[in-house]
Amino acid sequence: MGSIVAENRKTMMLFSGRAFPELAEEIGGVLGIAPTPADAYDFASGEIFVRFKESVRGSDAFVVQSMVQPVNKWLVEALIMVDALKRGSAKRITVVLPFYPYARQDKKHRGREPISARLVADLFATAGADRILTVDLHTAQIQGFFDGPVDHLFAMDTLASYVESRYAGRPMTVVAPDSGRVRVAERWTDRLGGCPLAFIHKTRDPLKPNHVVANRVVGDVEDRICLVVDDMIDTGSTILRAADILHESGAAEVIVAATHAVLSDPATERLKNSRITEVVVTNTLPLPPEKRLDKITQLSIAPLLARAIREVFDDGSVTTLFGGLS
């Protein structure tokens, strides 16, 4: 019936937005519960209506919403779901955002710009969320935007386990696609047994989004498998340019590991025609049929999210569970 009762009589309830219900169902399958039935639809005007079909009073509520396109619609739906739970007297509301929206707008680059990542956090707090659970934030500072607990999970173990099994025994270098990802790449080198680290030094034109001006490789990549790691693939321009310069620098093969497969057009076409051997991503976002390529491998993030939800529900330690990184 969409809920389970623990020994201390707390009730866990799982709620799914309409953006990517398959992920919520997979999470529920791991937890042994089903998402709570709801009436959710759009009015003719475009406004959204949500009503849950079961009582949520006193529950420990977990709202799962993946921010796929159109992002703004699903963001508003998640806010409305939280408001409905608050007004239905849920005891605690945790918003599970596998992909945090507006994460790249985390600071002002020039005057008169918004800090939209902070605004999103404020909106969820105002709606009534007590806690946020998310995966691989673009920058860790976003955790401080929300006045409450933020469980920041990492997909690295999920991705790295696959890479290890697939490319075992071959010389590998972990590559950060820019200087801002070096710290993440360092965690990968530790996770993969201390393999070498390289990074792409690049400059951008601040007036042209997704436009790289120039770059070069710093590190040992010749005759090695180069694993480019990033938090997301959007248009693909960053990793494609990285792949090109790595091949020009003598890399034997280029593979990519990224948590969030945003894949805005023309990313799929770019990847299809690129010199990248394999792209490994998770299902924090759905991969529609038209964006599925033979070289894209999608791994499930559901077990990671389910374990974190269980720890939150049991008042356990998410930090301990995920290697002290959360």
Image (tube, rainbow, N blue to C red):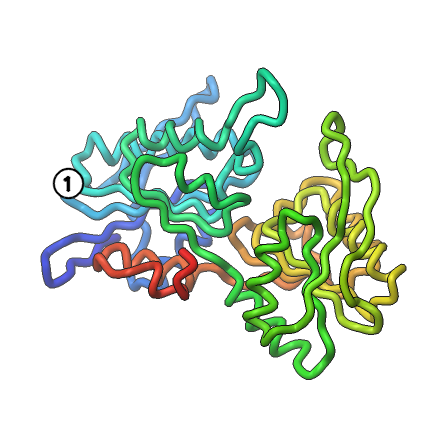
Q: Is residue 60 above or below residue 28?
A: above
Residue 51 point in image, percent of width and height: 29, 33
Task: Residue 283 in the image: state x and y as whole percent.
Answer: 53, 55
Relative side of 36 to 226, left or right:
left
Residue 18 appears in which quarter of the rendering?
top left
Return the residue found at the far left.
8
Query: Circle 1 is placed at which residue position?
Result: 57
Q: Quadrant of residue 322?
A: bottom left
Which residue is found at the position 62% from the left and 51% from the top?
181
Residue at 85% in and 55% down: 244
Task: Please state if 79 lies on the left or on the right of 179 as rendered.
Answer: left
Residue 57, x across and y down, in percent: 15, 40
Label 1 residue SS = loop
Residue drawn where x is 72% and y is 32% of the image: 209
Is 187 situated above or below 120?
Answer: below
**Taking 114 as reference, is 36 left or right?**
left
Disc 1 marks a residue whose amino acid type is Arg
Can residue 63 be seen by looking at this rendering? no
Name above or below for residue 195 compared with residue 41.
below
Q: Position of residue 190 (x, y in %)?
A: 56, 70
Q: How many marks?
A: 1
- Between 317 and 120, the one lying in front of the other is 317
Q: Residue furthest front?
A: 218
